[in-house]
Amino acid sequence: MTRNRAAAAYRSIDLESAVASASAHELISLLFKELNKSLLAAEYQFEQGNVQEMRNHVTKASRVLAGLQGSLDFEKGGEIANNLASLYGFAIRQLFRSTAAGEVDNVTSVKGLIAPIAEAWESISPNNLQTGAMNSNTAGVGLKQAYAIA
């Protein structure tokens, strides 16, 4: 087994372990982190002139966005869940355009769109999710309901 394949296998096992032991809040956090890593990697690969690798990372980012979209609870999340679903759909379309054109501008714009949502999600304390108490972070309250993980 080559060094790269061994490292990839280790990362895969590490991620599987993290997913298996994660709470619902942590799973969404993992998705946001993976999305950010994929978008950063796509930008880097484009800068290096490796458009095919950029496309691979864009495809992964699109799959993560679809996972975030699929985890929304429209019944409990209401308008916020609908808005997030629309935003994720828009982001996926922008990433497909990036892949088709072999350019990175849409990747950068998607990264900018998603960053505030990921930050709001990270600001939610898992302890508050368990007790039902929330701070004054209204974005966090809405996200909690949109993903209905409490």
Image: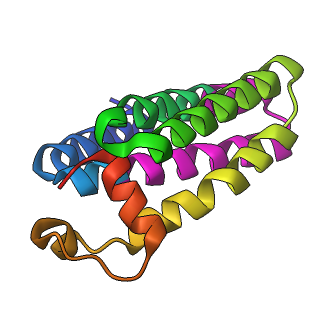
Q: How is the image coloured?
A: rainbow
**Residue 4 versus residue 13: which sits nearer the camera?**
13
Q: What residue range appears in magenta?
A: 29-58
Say whether residue 62 is left or right of residue 149: right
Tell me: residue 79, above or below residue 57.
below
Which quarter of the picture shows residue 33?
A: bottom left
Q: Quadrant of the N terminus?
A: top left
Vertical relation: 56 (above or below) 64: above
Residue 59 falls left or right of residue 120: right
**Residue sitting at 31 percent across and 34 percent down?**
75
Residue at x-position 41% and y-position 67%: 140
Residue 103 magenta-highlighted: no
* Residue pictured at 45% horizontal, 32% vertical: 69
Instruction: Please identify the quadrant where the C terminus is shown.
Output: bottom left
Q: Is residue 54 left or right of residue 8?
A: right
* Residue drawn at 39 percent across, 33 percent down: 5
48 part of magenta stretch: yes
Figure disc tally? 0
Side (left or right) of 32 relative to 115: left
The percent position of residue 125, horizontal first and vertical second, equals 27, 75
Say if residue 71 shows up in the picture: no
Q: Residue furthest top?
A: 100
The percent coordinates of residue 90 (x first, y second) are 69, 31
The image quadrant that residue 88 belongs to is top right
Q: 85 or 31: nearer the eye?
A: 85
Q: Main secondary structure of the magenta part?
A: helix
Residue projecting furthest to the bottom = 136
Q: Is residue 3 visible?
A: yes
Q: Position of residue 63 (x, y in %)?
A: 49, 27
Residue 123 vs residue 131, the one in the foreground:
131
